[in-house]
Amino acid sequence: MAVIAFANSKGGSGKTTSALLLASELANTTPVTIIDADPRHPISTWAKMPGVPERLTVVTNASEKTILDEIEEAAARDPFVVIDLEGTASRLMSYAISQADLVIIPLKEQQQDALAAIDVIKEIHRDMKAVRREIPYAVLFTQSKVVAKSRTARFIAQQFRDNPRIDAFEVEIFERDAFAALFAVGGTVRSMAAGDVNNIDAALKNVENFTTEVIARLRANRDRQGREVA
């Protein structure tokens, strides 16, 4: 069982898209619950459209009072629980982070997103003190340009990657037509026809690489924690 929370206190960071991409890809082979804790409930809206994977269960969070029970129930049922948190710092965010095996902090390569990501990292460290355990986390660059990144984008990304105290995904979520189309037409990247969106093969490869790195990180974290306990 693994609980994966997506958190950024700034809206528009690519948080919901990244959470849905991961949950949908995992659900291709194993049962997954995704908890929609964003007050706008974008994933719950997506789930009303056709094409939801059979192994994917979408739970709409009721409130901060119920989030811990929702996580517990989902974790008892499915191997993976993915949580799309609200785009503001809150008690609900703190509760969910305290239960996570991995916190993913999506951000665009922009200064406001970077500052919001740092705020989330500070919150994670406060939650570590509260629960008295390490909570693994990593930043994930989203809506990245495949080519011709701006100088500012490269600078912001490098500031995170060069910081020894902050972990960052090697994989980036690129700006792809298929990812934007998810919330317009429903379904998953795998269910889209090649003629409906541009570069579907590249989009699918991006999702596969992201999912592979998430699994690798979860395994590495568990191995490290096992060694520490031993």
Image (tube, helix red, strand yellow):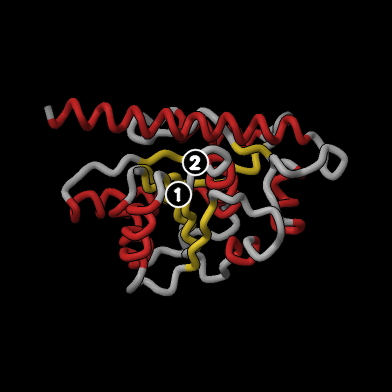
Where does the N terminus fall, quadrant-wise?
Answer: top left
Q: Return the mark for residue 117.
A: 1
**Quadrant in the rendering for residue 90:** bottom left
Q: Which residue has dot 2 on it?
A: 30
Q: Which mark is residue 222?
A: none
Q: What element carries label 1?
A: helix
Residue at the image position 40 percent from the left and 63 percent from the top: 89
In which quadrant of the rendered view does residue 163 lie? top left
Residue placed most toward the observer, 105 or 151? 105
Location of residue 56 in the rendering, given as x and y in whole percent from the top left corner: 54, 52
> Earlier along the polypeptide chain: callout 1 or callout 2?
2
Question: Is 113 placed above or below 226 here?
Answer: below
Residue 54: image x %, image y %?
59, 51
> What's under tag 1, amino acid-wise?
Ala
Residue 169 spot, x, y in % from top left: 48, 32
Residue furthest out toward the right:
195
Relative to residue 205, is residue 115 depicted above or below?
below
In this rendering, the count of numbered labels is 2
Residue furthest out toward the left:
230
Task: Identify the element where label 2 is drawn.
Answer: loop
Residue sitting at 66 percent across and 29 percent down? 205
